[in-house]
């Protein structure tokens, strides 16, 4: 990675880190933390779905696993919250690897893979809802005990900085993937699996690595969710709402890009909040906005917001270099 | 180097390849010709590991590779191109070739350098940053060749890299293929363009209806009765001979 790869990440993270110094209102910080948790989970989805082209409809399976593992470890076994966080990530990666092994080894792709992931998430939701070990339908309440050692902070800003640091770390991870052999092979598998195999890419291994990484990152976001709101139940942790959020954000922001998931999460939740401010009395207005934004993105911005910006930039520059490109377009 | 021994492939009731045998020694260009539907591409797919043979064995440098995955064979040094080009359409030419180069070069800088080098050799040096999806047909054929070359193969399987090119494009690419051979890569090529086969191949195998019916230097094989009949139908060889006698 070169300085040019790192500077945008560093600058944006620093700017975002300054926000709590300006904004001190709790609802706004709440919104920002929630948005960043979604962005983090979406970054996980983007590793597998964006770079690997394996669209999962069931990333709740990883989000929920992260949330439940950290909650159960603390409540039932008295494990420290930070250790719980690490184990939650490991559990998410392991669940990812197993789901990947079962589905990729049998050659599932495209919509079949999407349906299988959806099924896994639903099975987990039903099991977590039924078993007393996971608190059943009543859910799990993590004990309020504000102390940094318990991953609970008196000041919301501290939690904000923690989530922000992790989002930045995953931005770096994603940038590294983009610049590495692993990333090149993953993208090759997305673009054309047979051609990749002919070039010596072990597509199964590459996809398994991607889904394990993806599961780990998304489990991290689930773990932070549980730690911030201190309550989870099956419909929150394994609910299809989170699967949808995690795939919408990258699609809106720009699939397979480093910043796409964060831009998408910010846009979606930003617009959702604005809509709630103006039409708060209509229940579900934010979901209507999500749907509208998705329709717009699919119809007019195939590469998401970042893809749209890039195209506009190219068009701006294109005044000089347009000639040969346009010819080749016409030739197609 | 490569020994294909009595390999067969059955698709349901169709015997696509029927106990074909073929052997290659290091160096040189060997052709695989035959009428459409003879099973040439199926045989290629079995050598490169994309299709499992129903029967028979394939050995590469003395090792039995019949059951190995395609990527393992690529690691061993078997490169292939696809008859229907399979570019990574969303990537640039350079990124496309780099995927192949990554097989032997773990670092991005090395793989990219290798990709640029290979691109220049096949005549894609000026198109490195172009999206592969925007290349012309000839460009895509060159890209197939470049990607396979970037894996630094010992054996290169070329599946109709000249098909769909015009005569001047064919003239341009023939020296490229010869150059690859001169660097010590063994080449097995499926080709319909007979001018190129005559020009490039020291030896050709002829496959018809799944069976290997002839083998030898191109000029000899083209005069072979069985080969003429495989292409032109039963009795064609006699008719040609009779016509030849009448005109002579």
Image: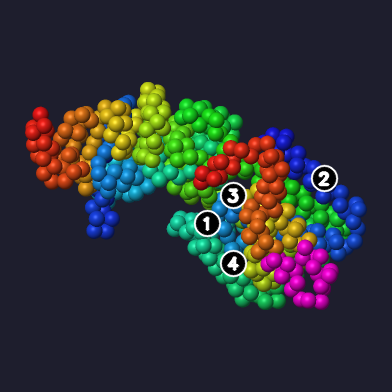
Q: Quadrant of residue B32?
A: top left
Chain ID for label 3?
A
First in sequence, mark 4 or 1: give its number.
1
Report crowding for label 1: few under 14, some 14 to 19, many 20 or more residues within 10 A (C-alpha).
Answer: many
Q: CA distance from mark 4 to mark 1?
A: 13 Å
Q: CA distance from mark 2 to mark 4?
A: 35 Å
Q: Name the residue that disc number 4 marks.
A: A121
First in sequence, mark 3 or 2: give its number.
2
Q: Is residue B105 visible?
A: no
Q: Nearer the viewer, mark 3 or mark 4?
A: 3
Q: Name the residue that disc number 3 marks.
A: A51
Residue at 55%, 34% in the rendered image: B127
Q: Which residues are magenta?
A: A271-292
| Residue A228, horizontal then vertical, whole percent | 78, 62
For residue A121, side relative to residue B81 (left or right): right
Give the structural element (helix, strand or loop) at label 4.
helix
Q: Name the residue that disc number 1 marks.
A: A100
Q: Nearer the viewer, mark 3 or mark 1?
A: 3
């Amino acid at each position: 990675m070169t300085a040019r790869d790192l500077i945008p990440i560093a600058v944006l993270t620093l700017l975002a880190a300054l926000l709590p110094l300006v904004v001190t209102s709790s609802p706004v910080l709440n919104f920002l933390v929630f948005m960043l948790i979604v962005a983090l989970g979406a970054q996980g989805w983007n590793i597998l779905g964006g770079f690997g082209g394996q669209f999962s409809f069931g990333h709740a399976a990883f989000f929920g696993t992260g949330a439940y593992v950290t909650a159960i470890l603390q409540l039932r076994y008295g494990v420290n919250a930070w250790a719980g966080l690490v184990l939650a990530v490991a559990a998410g990666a392991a669940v990812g690897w197993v789901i990947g092994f079962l589905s990729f080894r049998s050659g599932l792709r495209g919509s079949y893979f999407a349906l299988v992931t959806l099924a896994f998430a639903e099975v987990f939701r039903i099991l977590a809802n039924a078993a007393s070990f996971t608190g059943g339908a009543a859910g799990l309440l993590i004990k309020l005990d504000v102390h940094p050692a318990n991953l609970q902070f008196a000041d919301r800003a501290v939690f904000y900085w923690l989530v922000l640091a992790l989002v930045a770390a995953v931005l770096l991870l994603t940038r590294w993937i983009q610049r590495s052999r692993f990333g090149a092979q993953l993208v090759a598998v997305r673009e054309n699996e047979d051609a990749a195999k002919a070039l010596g890419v072990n597509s199964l291994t590459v996809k398994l690595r991607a889904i394990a990484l993806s599961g780990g990152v998304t489990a991290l976001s689930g773990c932070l969710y549980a730690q911030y709101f201190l309550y989870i139940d099956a419909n929150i942790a394994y609910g299809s709402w989170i699967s949808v959020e995690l795939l919408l954000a990258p699609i809106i922001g720009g699939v397979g890009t480093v910043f796409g998931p964060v831009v998408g999460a910010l846009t979606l939740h930003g617009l959702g909040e604005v809509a709630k401010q103006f039409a708060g009395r209509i229940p579900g207005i934010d979901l209507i906005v999500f749907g509208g934004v998705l329709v717009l993105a699919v119809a007019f911005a195939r590469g998401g917001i970042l893809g749209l910006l890039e195209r506009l930039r190219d068009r701006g520059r294109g005044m000089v270099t347009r000639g040969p490109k346009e010819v080749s377009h016409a030739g197609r | 180097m490569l020994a294909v021994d009595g390999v067969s492939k059955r698709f349901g009731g169709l015997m696509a390849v029927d106990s074909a045998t073929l052997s290659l020694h290091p160096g040189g260009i060997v052709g695989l010709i035959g009428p459409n539907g003879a099973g040439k591409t199926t045989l290629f797919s079995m050598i490169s590991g994309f299709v499992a043979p129903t029967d028979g064995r394939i050995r590469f440098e003395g090792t039995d590779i019949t059951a190995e995955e395609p990527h393992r064979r690529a690691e061993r040094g078997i490169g292939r191109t696809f008859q229907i080009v399979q570019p990574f359409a969303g990537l640039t030419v350079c990124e496309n070739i780099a995927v192949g180069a990554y097989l032997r070069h773990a670092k991005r800088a090395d793989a990219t350098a290798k990709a640029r080098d290979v691109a220049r050799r096949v005549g894609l040096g000026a198109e490195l940053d172009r999206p592969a999806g925007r290349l012309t047909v000839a460009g895509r054929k060159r890209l197939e060749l470049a990607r396979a070359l970037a894996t630094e193969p010992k054996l290169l399987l070329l599946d109709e890299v000249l098909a769909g090119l015009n005569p001047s494009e064919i003239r341009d690419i023939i020296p490229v293929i010869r150059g690859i051979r001169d660097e010590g890569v063994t080449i097995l090529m499926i080709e319909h363009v007979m001018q190129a086969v005559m020009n490039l191949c020291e030896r050709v195998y002829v496959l018809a209806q799944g069976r290997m019916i002839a083998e030898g230097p191109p000029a000899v094989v083209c005069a072979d009765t069985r080969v003429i009949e495989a292409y032109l139908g039963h009795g064609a060889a006699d008719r040609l001979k009779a016509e030849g006698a009448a005109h002579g």
